Structure formats: C-alpha cells, structure tokens
Image (cartoon, rainbow, N blue to C red):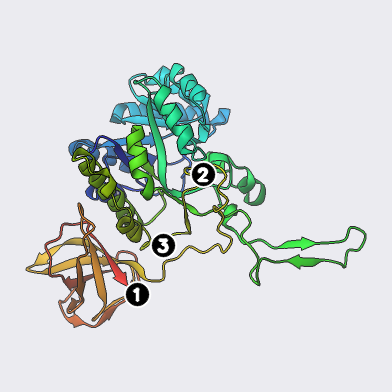
Amino acid sequence: MSKVELLAPAGSLEKAKIAFMYGADAVYAGTAKLSLRSRAELNDDSLEETIKYAHSIGKKVYVALNIYANDKDYGEIEEQILRLKEVKADAIIASDPGVIMQIRKLAPEIDIHISTQANTVSLHSAMFWREFGAKRVILSRELSKEQIEYIMENKPEDLEVEMFIHGAICYAYSGRCYLSKYLANRCANQGDCAQPCRWQYKITAQEVNNPDSKINVDYDEKGTYLFSSKDMCLIKQIPTIIDMGVDSLKIEGRLKTDYYLATVVRAYRNAIDEYEMLKSKGKQENYDYTKYLKELEKVKTRGLSEFYFSDSNNQDIHDFDGKSENLDYEYGARVIRKDKDDIYIVEIKNKLSLGDKLEILLPNTIDECKFTIEKLYDVKNDKEIETINPGIKGQQVKIKIPYELVPGTIIRRKR
C-alpha cells in the first residue's frame, strides 16, 4: 500500500529478517569496520547473505561506508566498494567527500545516499550533494518540519529525501562528536563511539586559590547526566511527514535488540498503512497515533521527544536521569520453529515460568494477542518443567502456544 519507504536498521542477518517480517521496505547495514556502528554483528559474508535474502523477497539493502576516513583507510574502502558492487548493494551511505568520490569512480552504478553525518540542513546543501552525484540525502535530525517542507517543495524530483522518525539523538550535531575520542580514545567519527553522552557526571565547584574548597554540584544524589538526550519519536507526525512527500522514513538502532526492532518497525508500519488507507478515503482526520505510541512505550527506551520537528525552540530534549528502561514489559522469546500441534521451540531472552502472561507481536497488526504459559517442556527430553532461565546464549525451550506462528515471531513478557 505504502508509497513512502519504511527503512529499518539491520545489525545482523537475523535482525534484517525480523525487520522485513514486521514491515520494513528496506534495511540499512554497516560494513565490519567502515561504518559508524563498527561493533554491530554484521561481517562481510553475512552482509552478502543479507543482500541476497532481501533481493529474493523484493526488498532493499543500503550499506553504510559513512566514517570520516583517514588516508590509511582508503585501501580497505576501495576493496569494500568493489565488493559492494559485486554483491549488488542497492545504495551506499556515505558522508566523506573522499569516500563519495571513490564510489563514483569505482562503482558509478550504485546509488549514493548522503549520510546524516554530512549535516544536510538546507536545500542548498542538498543541491550540492545532488550535483556531486547523490541519489538521496538523509536530512539532519535537527531540522524542523518547516525546514523539511521547504526542501521538499523546492528540490528537484530526481533527488530523494530520507529523514529519521525514531531512535537515539546524539548530543553532538548529527553525531559529529569528538568527546568519545577525548575521554575514551574511541573515535565516534570512525565507528567506535563509547557514548560518553550517556555517562553520569559530577560537577565540582572550587575556589581558585583554595584547593580544599571543592563542592559537588549535584542534580540529585546520583549526579547528573549532562549530555544525555531523549529519544526521537515522530509517530504523531506521520500524517504531516507523509503529506510533505518525504521518500524514506528511517528508524535508528543497529545495536538494539530483536524485540526493540520488531516493536518499533511494526508500530510505524501499521501507522503508515493506516494513515494512507484513511487518506485514500478522505478520512485523514481519523488517524489515531495513541495506540501506536502505547506500543512504542513497551520497549526499553529513554524518554521520548519530537526534538525540533514541531518546535525549533523545544527544550524538552534532555534525559537528566540517564534511565533506559521499561518497567512493565521485557523481551520474552523468539520463535525458532513449530515442533508439533501447538508446541513451539523458542529461544528465550528472559526467565519464563508457568503462569507468565505473554504477548505475541504479530506482523501486519498491533491487535493484542495474549496467552498464559500453561506448558513448558525441556527441548532435550520433552520433560515438563515449571521454569527456565536464559543461562546460555541461545537457550531454548518448548512451549505451548495457542496460535499459528511463523519462525522469527517475537514474544514479549509482561513483568
């Protein structure tokens, strides 16, 4: 149904499959060393598998080569460009002009998407990148809806525009930060950010001529999270964004869990489809974002904010408590396969016990699908058990589920 693209993060092949299952039209992934999420699980071989899988189901994969490169990096960059050409990546996301120049030289047939790291905040910048060979610009997260609307109304038709609609916001201008390098010797602009903006800090006041006069200036007894920002959430603004004609709506989070990915992609997929259905019937005013917001609040997240989208003077963007939690729900399990009848083998993510209340995240709908655990079985001997803990990675259990589910389905547990 949708004309606008829903773009999701893929930190691994499995996460790409989950993103597609829950409604993403395309995913973006990084290379092993040359993107701004160098600690993601995707290596070159699994990246190739991801691209092949996506193309087999009519989906797309955009690959990030968006570090700011030193001269010593270019040998590896050129090898990676040629590899992406060979495996037929749908686009390369880049920000460094030197990297972009090499893409144009070595793989002119691959579309170039200008990373948000390039800080595109104006029509003039967008036009520069178009002249430099870009197919798409990913706008800076700092823009207001009026600024985005101006760009959409005045850009040429052959230039696509992508914007972030959900996820973490960097303390620095579109993520171009040197604080991590200074404090932890891990350079954010080369994909190794230690996220010092999320750290707890203490401010100390000291009279210059009296070294014994130190006084801690605390926000509370824990200190304060000076730089930590809330997460972006534009679920309420989906009608405005679609009506502006933005080509691609992007979700941040290549290092997030499968549960986070499924929840967020599912919410935005259904929101987009509902609004476009209502719009086709002339009933746009009936769009109700609140049910989707409730879904988004069921995952581990910081406080939510529209950042500067609705108000360029918005001050409600800081998360001084530094908390990232959801007290009501947690990741329960992921379906591996059906065993027999209504018995499924699942990989558990948190402790499960008889009597636990679970919710299934069904693709294509956010309707509630609940059940209570009545039977658990050991996967090795089919012996009935009362509880199981995720003691090892990949811990599995057999569970009775009164629904027909496909592999990869995510199940959450109500605490």
- Give amino acid for label 2: Asp
- When asked about the image quadrant of residue 222, the answer is bottom right
Local packing at callout 2 (Cα closer than 10 Å; few below 14, some 14-19, many 20+) is few
Residue 197 versus residue 367: which sits nearer the camera? 367
Tell me the element at label 2: loop
Q: Residue furthest right?
A: 209
Instruction: Name the spot of residue 3 as percent of width and height, x first.
Output: 25, 34
Q: From the viewer's perspective, is residue 250 above or below residue 402?
A: above
Tell me the element at label 3: loop
Apparent side of residue 101 relative to residue 56 in the rendered image (left or right):
right
Task: Give the mark, 1 or 3, whose residue is nearer the N terminus.
Answer: 3
Residue 327 versus residue 243: which sits nearer the camera? 243
Calculate the distance from the C-alpha at mark 1 to the C-alpha at mark 3: 13 Å
In this rendering, the label closer to the viewer, 2 or 1: 2
Instruction: Name the spot of residue 242 as percent of width and height, x first.
Output: 32, 37
Q: From the viewer's perspective, is residue 397 above or below residue 186?
A: below
Tell me the element at label 1: loop
Local packing at callout 1 (Cα closer than 10 Å; few below 14, some 14-19, many 20+) is few
Q: How many discs mark residues in the rendered view? A: 3
Quadrant where the C terminus is found in the figure: bottom left
Local packing at callout 3 (Cα closer than 10 Å; few below 14, some 14-19, many 20+) is many
Q: From the viewer's perspective, is residue 296 above or below residue 34?
A: below
- Give amino acid for label 1: Arg
> Which residue is identified by label 3?
300
Which residue appears at 15% of the width and 77% of the height?
A: 382
> Which residue is identified by label 1?
415
Task: Give the mark, 3 or 2, whose residue is nearer the N terminus.
Answer: 3
Instruction: Name the spot of residue 80 as percent of width and height, x first.
Output: 40, 31
Q: Residue furthest left?
A: 341
Q: From the viewer's perspective, is residue 251 above or below residue 322?
A: above
> Which residue is identified by label 2?
311
